[in-house]
Image (cartoon, grey):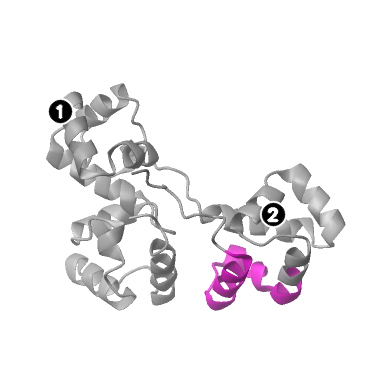
Amino acid sequence: MNLNYHIDSRKYTLQQLKTNLLSREMIPSRKALKEDLERRFEILEKMGILNLQDLINALKNNKTIESFSASSGISIDYLTLLRREANSYLPNPVPLNKFPGVSPQDLNRLKEKGIKNSRHLFEQAGLDQDRKELAKHSGVPLEKLNELAGLSDLVRAYGVGPVFARILYDTGIHSIRRLIGYSPEEIIQLYEEKFNQKADFSLRDMHFCLEIARILDL
């Protein structure tokens, strides 16, 4: 069975994207995305943009953004910001050495097998049987591979970087499947109880993170 590292961007509709942008509390650098959003997204739809992949294709570089701006009347600045937001739904793979607490020796053994980042590990060892085979041929203990596979799975979620993945893992959330079994309130409570400090992410952040996580391949 082949697992997709990212969400299926062709099934994530433009209307879903619009709803999420309207409902979320944006970071300061992206607040402008909400300006005149209804009208701009209506234009996008009329231009044939129906899903996230259509949007990414239309705004893939500066040249296509300039062309799209000229034909749609939407400013280059807004489209550039929208491209950043759209691409963030398909996070870049995380180099395995960015995960806290990973043995350099294990990293070198995986590197010899061509596995250098979270996507490589997810695609080649996302399933239990594949990890057992990799442990046998790489020399990396299965326990360590399971941990790395869990971290590599967690960073597929929107807004989850290597440090936050480690935090989630250390609270007992070892996979996307486990993550979506919790409510945002429960995740924040787990974090605050384990680390004895207030969480630096909001309920809205976690609501959106879980919403995207639920449509990932498990």
Q: Position of residue 119 (x, y in %)?
A: 39, 41
Specify start and end residues of the magenta stretch as a single range.
13-40
Name the N-terminal-most of marks 1 and 2: 2
**Outermost residue toward the front?**
1
The residue type indicated by label 1 comes to: Lys
Mark 1 or 2: in front is 1
Is 20 a magenta residue?
yes
Give the vertical position of 96 relative to 171 (above or below): above
The amino acid type, in three-letter code, at marker 2 is Thr
Which element is circle 1 on? helix
- Location of residue 212 in the rendering, given as x and y in whole percent from the top left corner: 44, 64
At horizontal 23% and vertical 37% (from top left) the residue drawn is 130
Residue 213 placement, left or right of 11: left
For the C terminus, the image quarter is bottom left
Characterize the local packing of mark 1: few (<14), some (14-19) or many (20 or more) Cα atoms within 10 angstroms.
few
Which secondary structure class fits the magenta region best? helix
Give yes or no for residue 153 being in the magenta stretch. no
Quick check: 104 above or below 159? Answer: above
Residue 135 is left or right of residue 210, and the answer is left
Q: Which of the 4 quarters of the picture holds residue 189? A: bottom left
Q: Which residue is mark 1?
A: 136
Image mark for residue 80: 2
Residue 114 placement: quadrant? top left
